[in-house]
Amino acid sequence: MMEIARKRETAIIITTVSFLITFLPYFFPIPALDVVQKYTVDWALITSYFMAIVGFYYLTKVNLIRLQKRPQGWLYGIITVILVWYMCITGFAFGTGHMSFKFFYDAIALSLTAMVGAIQGFYLVGAGNKIFRFRDVKSSFLLGAAVVILLKNAPVTTVIFPGIQPVGTYLIDILVNSANRAFKIGTAIAGIALGIRVLLGKESSQVGLATEG
């Protein structure tokens, strides 16, 4: 039985059947298939919960091993494990609305998120200093567009130079949105192509089988 479960064909068949059960009801009104789709989505949610439990277990295990070996930065892992355990225990025991849970979430999680965003801001400024330099014709377009967008978002500049506002709006609403849509369409097509390769067995690594099992 385990040999059958480990075979490459078994994983591909399960992936294909699950895909068809979830995908077809969006295009073909088949009542029986709608019911099966609902159960399949519920199974996927339950599986994701088990994946979270497994991830929680391995997070604890890996950091406890690091505690024994004491490599560089091991203390940060222990702090992470302590906070994760604390949030889980207080959340399950008292609920997410309890003061002990909300205090650590508001005082630590939100504060760290804001700190990471602030640090990234400095890196973005440094990267922008290297990117927005006049080297050739292509870089001049990028530099010009960046300057116009920055001036558009400055209230004083739009008062002194009223013509900046419509130009900046055109760049954002027309050019930027068009580029974003082209990028999303290209990403979607690439995802569809990858999905077809997975269903055909051409990408076995996507189902956890790099080689024939």
Image (cartoon, grey):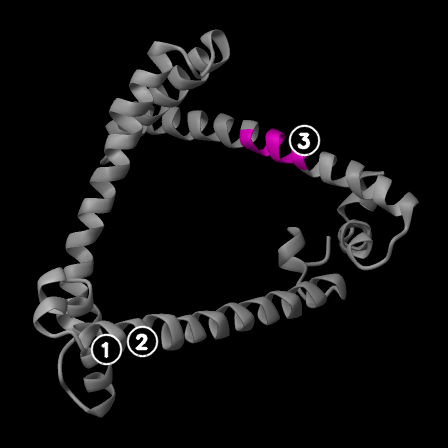
Decide which of tag 3 and tag 1 comes sooner along the chain.
Answer: 3
Res 145 label: 1
**In magenta segment, residue 48:** yes
- Residue found 37% across the figure and 28% down from its top: 63
* Residue type, numbered disc 3: Ile
Res 171 label: 2
122 sits to left or right of 61: left
Relative to 52, is 34 above or below?
below
- Residue found 49% across the figure and 75% down from its top: 182
Mark 1: few/some/many CA within 10 Å (<14, 14-19, 20+): some
* Residue type, numbered disc 1: Ala
**In magenta segment, residue 196:** no
* Residue type, numbered disc 2: Leu
Q: Nearer the viewer, residue 62 or 196?
A: 196
Q: Which residues are magenta?
A: 45-52
Report if the CB atoms under discs 1 and 2 are less than 8 Å apart.
yes
Q: Nearer the viewer, mark 2 or mark 3?
A: 2
Res 87 label: none
Distance of mark 3 from mark 1, alpha carbons? Answer: 47 Å
Residue 5 position within the rendered picture, expressed as x and y whole percent measured from the top left: 79, 43
Residue 195 position within the rendered picture, expressed as x and y whole percent measured from the top left: 67, 63
Mark 3: few/some/many CA within 10 Å (<14, 14-19, 20+): few
